[in-house]
Image (tube, grey):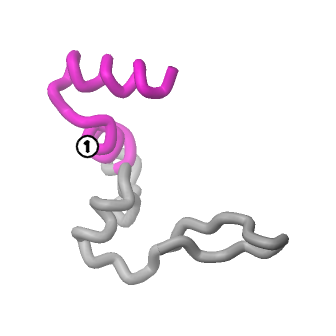
Amino acid sequence: MFIVAGEIIHRVSGLSWADFIEQKIMKPVGMTSSFGSYNHAKAANVSNIIDAHAPINGKAVAIP
């Protein structure tokens, strides 16, 4: 259902899901250091960012 919601947002607004969330929700409430996608955060050169992790052999390991 999340994929469908993203497609509806794109068709109605003309924005990607990430752009819509950033412009219509995050920025109006003051979330200026938050992003709707990992790629947007990387493009903004944000240094305070978490990497994805996955459990491997019972431990959380960073996934590049």
Number of dots carrying numbers? 1
Chief SS of the magenta region? helix
Give the structural element (helix, strand or loop) at label 1. helix
Indicate whether 5 appears above or below 29.
above
Q: Is residue 14 left or right of residue 56?
A: left
Q: 29 and 54: which one is in front?
A: 54
Q: Quadrant of residue 14?
A: top left
Q: Is residue 11 left or right of residue 59?
A: left
Furthest residue toward left: 14
Q: 20 and 26: which one is in front?
A: 20
Instruction: Measuring from the top left, give residue 39's x and y in whole percent.
Output: 30, 61
* Residue that numbered label 1 is attached to: 19
Q: At 81% from the left edge and 72% from the top edge, which residue is drawn? A: 57
**Residue 5 shown in magenta:** yes
Indicate whether 4 appears above or below 39.
above
**Residue 30 shown in magenta:** no
Instruction: Measuring from the top left, give residue 59's x and y in whole percent.
Output: 79, 75
Instruction: Measuring from the top left, give residue 20's x and y in whole percent.
Output: 28, 37
- Magenta segment: 1-26
Furthest residue toward right: 58
Indicate whether 24 appears above or below 32.
above
Q: Quadrant of residue 30?
A: bottom left
Q: 1 and 59: which one is in front?
A: 59
Q: Quadrant of residue 18?
A: top left
Q: At 84% from the left edge and 71% from the top edge, which residue is drawn? A: 58
Q: At 33% from the left edge and 66% from the top edge, which residue is drawn? A: 41
Q: Residues within 10 Å of mark 1 (few under 14, many from 20)?
A: some
Indicate whether 40 appears above or below 48.
above
Furthest residue toward bottom: 47
Q: At 40% from the left edge and 57% from the top edge, which residue is drawn? A: 31
